[in-house]
Amino acid sequence: MIVVDASVLVTALTDGGAEGALSRNALASSGSLHAPHLLDVEVTAALRGFALGNRIDASDAATAIADLVGYPIARYDHAPLLERTFELRDVLTTYDAMYVALAELLETYVLTGDRRMARAVASPDLVRVLEP
């Protein structure tokens, strides 16, 4: 069981190379996947940016959004996470803190591609960076 953040899922959905394969394999081998509902908004925003920046075409972005909707991730409401998210305000962005708060609640870790997030938390076991 893991909490997956948007960076790993965006790579899994859009990268046809080695990094995408690494992300997809990590997700497939992690057991159950969990995320705050924020994940869907963050991934969609990234896909929009990729399409506008011509990193992917609009039809590939639309396919990725359809894949996102069907991805087997348990999504969690923000309300139970807000207090802890705010407590983490000095070390994490609100978005990153939302994932960390969920990981703490579920007693697991966040899988991310964001090294800054990993460096910001006190416990190295709470946030793990997916690296080749």
Image (cartoon, rainbow, N blue to C red):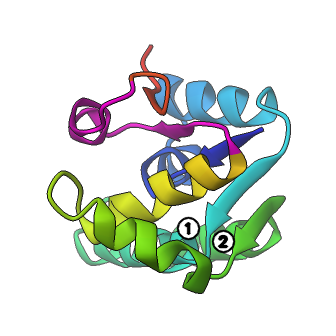
Amino acid type for the residue under numbered disc 2: Thr
Identified by mark 1, the residue type is Asp
Q: Is residue 61 left or right of residue 56?
A: right
Q: Residue at (27%, 78%) from the top-left corner?
A: 52
Point out the stretch of residues depicted in magenta: 107-123
Q: Position of residue 56 (x, y in %)?
A: 40, 62
Question: Residues under labels 2 and 1: Cα distance?
Answer: 5 Å
**Dot 1: what SS?**
helix
Q: In the image, is 32 to the left or to the right of 98? A: right
Q: Are marks 2 and 1 in contact (CB under 8 Å)?
A: yes
Q: In the rendering, which numbered label is found on residue 60? A: 1
- Residue situated in front as seen by the camera: 42 or 85: 85
Whether residue 54 appears in this view of the structure is no
Q: Please report the residue visible at 74 percent of the width from the left and 75 percent of the height from the top.
A: 69
Badge 1: how crowded within 10 Å, few (<14), some, or many (20+)?
Answer: some
Q: Residue at x 46, y 52 (%)?
A: 100
Q: Measured along the vertical axis of the image, is residue 113 above or below residue 21?
A: below
Which image quarter: residue 127? Answer: top left
Residue 108 in view: yes
Closer to us: 64 or 123: 123
Q: Which residue is mark 2?
A: 63
Helix, strand or loop for disc 2 = helix
Where 89 falls versus 48 (above or below)? above
Q: Measuring 78% from the left and 38% from the top, which residue is drawn there?
A: 1
